[in-house]
Image: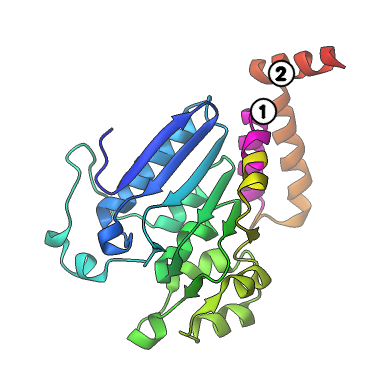
Amino acid sequence: MNYKFIQTEIKEHVFTLTLDREAKRNAFTPTTVNEVAHALEEAEANDQVHVLVLRANGPVFCAGMDLKTYQNPELDSPNPAIVNKERSLGEIFDQFNKPSIAIVEGDVIAGGFLYILGCTYVFAKNDLNFRLPEIALGIFPFQVMAGLKRIMSEKQILQLCFDPSPFQTDKAIELGLVDGYLEQDKIDDLIASFADKSIYAMQAGMKALKAIRDMESDKQYAFLLESLQNLRDRDEVKKFMAERLNKN
């Protein structure tokens, strides 16, 4: 697939997706969102892919939504191979059921938070700027709130959304937006660790965790037991377990 605003690569068990709209600070358009959706669907369906690594070209990781393009879709540059649909970037990442690692080497602004909130792990360079400027523009970071709700209280969310001032990586770590500083050796070890993990187990676990978010507590254990039974019944899982048990 020839994408306009992203680059993708599969190497061994790693699917790398790189935001590639550097001239516009990687601000996303409807085409960008649909290209990301297409790429993640490909990565999800490929059993050779065990982990997604998200990167960005240029000094800004993502400046959020390209407001001019969303206000005037004629400014967008559609990909003829993909039919653009109205989709939420946050929802696209939430529907991806494989581990994901964001490597953040530039500032994250506005809707750019959706990328890092959608990843399992986030590592960032020191002294980057993170900012939700929407309130200063008379709008609000509505979609970002869904991702924030999974890592902080409603009170913290409102305080963050009401303050358009930038904050640095250390504060992002304190808030739970970022998991640690960008130490490449440790990240390489983390990426490598997924090579021998069962992709079927990881996908089933992620799907189950999302399914019980709003499930009544008295129904969760029965659902999770059923999920375990369904996973164990898969031929691929039986083969994987047998190979591991024989090694021991």
Q: Position of residue 130 (x, y in %)?
A: 50, 73
Q: Position of residue 160 (x, y in %)?
A: 55, 81
Image point (55%, 52%), residue name: 119
Image point (66%, 75%), residue name: 153
Quadrant including the C terminus: top right
Which image quarter: residue 198?
top right
| Circles 2, 1 touching at the beta carbon (< 8 Å) | yes
Residue highlighted by disc 1: 198
Secondary structure found at label 1: loop
Judge by depth and name the residue closer to the eye, 191 or 241: 191
Query: Is 208 contained in the magenta span?
Result: yes
33 relative position to 180: left or right = left
Q: Amino acid at mark 2?
A: Phe
Query: Is 196 contained in the magenta span?
Result: yes
Over which residues does the magenta segment extend? Answer: 190-212
Image point (50%, 86%), residue name: 163
Depicted 183 relative to depicted 79: above or below: below
Does the image show residue 138? no
Which image quarter: residue 67?
bottom left
Residue highlighted by disc 2: 240
Secondary structure found at label 2: helix
Q: Closer to the N terminus: mark 2 or mark 1?
A: 1
Quadrant including the N terminus: top left
Q: Amino acid at mark 1?
A: Ser
**How busy is the neighbourhood of tag 1: few (under 14 within 10 Å), some, or many (20 plus)?**
some
Q: Position of residue 102 (x, y in %)?
A: 53, 52
User: Could you tell me how far apart the alpha carbons at marks 2 and 1 are, in whole angstroms?
Assistant: 7 Å
141 relative position to 241: left or right = left
